[in-house]
Amino acid sequence: MRVTFLGTGTSVGVPVLTCDCPVCGSSDERNRRLRAGLLLDWTNGDGESSRVLVDTTTDLRQQALRVGLDRVDGVLYTHHHADHVLGLDELRIFNFVHRVSIPLYGRSETMDAIRHTFAYAFDANARGVPRIDIHVTDGPFDVRGVRVIPVPVQHHRLTISAYRIGNFAYITDCNAIPESSAAMLRGVEILVIDALRRTPHPAHFSLAQALSEIERLEAGTAYLTHLSHEFEHGELEKELPEGVHVAYDGLVLEADEATV
């Protein structure tokens, strides 16, 4: 499985509007962070290739153009906050080109919010709208021959989905991982985890908290995401322990998916 970071930034992105700090003005492209999301590419045991998004970010059109996204075979949603869902309307072009509906997967409250926010997409008589199929998930499920394990984590008062696929796990917008969920993640070889800023935040891990969770989960290699403009890429990379890295937009990783 190929994992492409479409975005590694916060809900406001980096550079931040109105900000003239050194990171927002940096010429290092790794400090330019669109809203956090992933593209997953895999080929299942039958030789069928798939392209699956994790979230439809506010910046999805720009992200899709940058990576040459030619189709979407499904979307895994972590939760329903604006920066993770408001790019859903960009799925229309893939419907038009490929003439198929796109399956969406997520928790019941996430799917309910999508039905409400994008009510026009569920009007059977409407034209020119996204064609999507809702799939509520409350346990492991299969997407085009690959087993996907949603892992409940806390985002302040909201329970959202982290995801584990084979030896890869993705945890964004998180401030606490219950022990039952930690057991589902422990020993993962490649871990991507939220690290918003240095100081504590009620809905996100700080840098110190993220590093503590990486150790707790006994991850092989870890990548920090959902990063604010408080972090300069090169400087942060130098201070991290061995096996922990700063993710950046466009970074590509190779992982092993679990086929079914």
Image (spheres, rainbow, N blue to C red):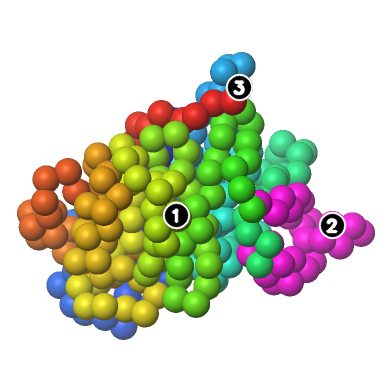
The amino acid at mark 1 is Ser
The alpha-carbon separation of the residues under discs 1 and 3 comes to: 31 Å
The alpha-carbon separation of the residues under discs 2 and 3 comes to: 30 Å
Q: Quadrant of residue 187?
A: top left
For the record, the magenta segment spans: 110-137
Q: Is residue 219 above or below residue 127?
A: above
Q: Is residue 119 above or below residue 103?
A: below
Q: Is residue 18 above or below residue 109?
A: below
Check the image and name the residue furthest to the top. Answer: 46
From the viewer's perspective, tell me whether residue 119 is left or right of residue 91: right
Q: Secondary structure at mark 2?
A: loop
The answer to which of 36 and 188 lies nearer the viewer is 188
Residue 18 in sight: yes
> Could you say which disc has been placed on residue 181 in the image?
1
The amino acid at mark 3 is Glu
- Taking the spot 70% from the left edge, 45% from the top edge, the residue there is 102
The answer to which of 119 and 134 lies nearer the viewer is 134
Residue 86 in sight: no
Q: Secondary structure at mark 3?
A: loop
- The crowding category of the residue bearing disc 2, from other C-alpha atoms within 10 Å (few below 14, some 14 to 19, many at least 20), is few
Which image quadrant: the C terminus? top right
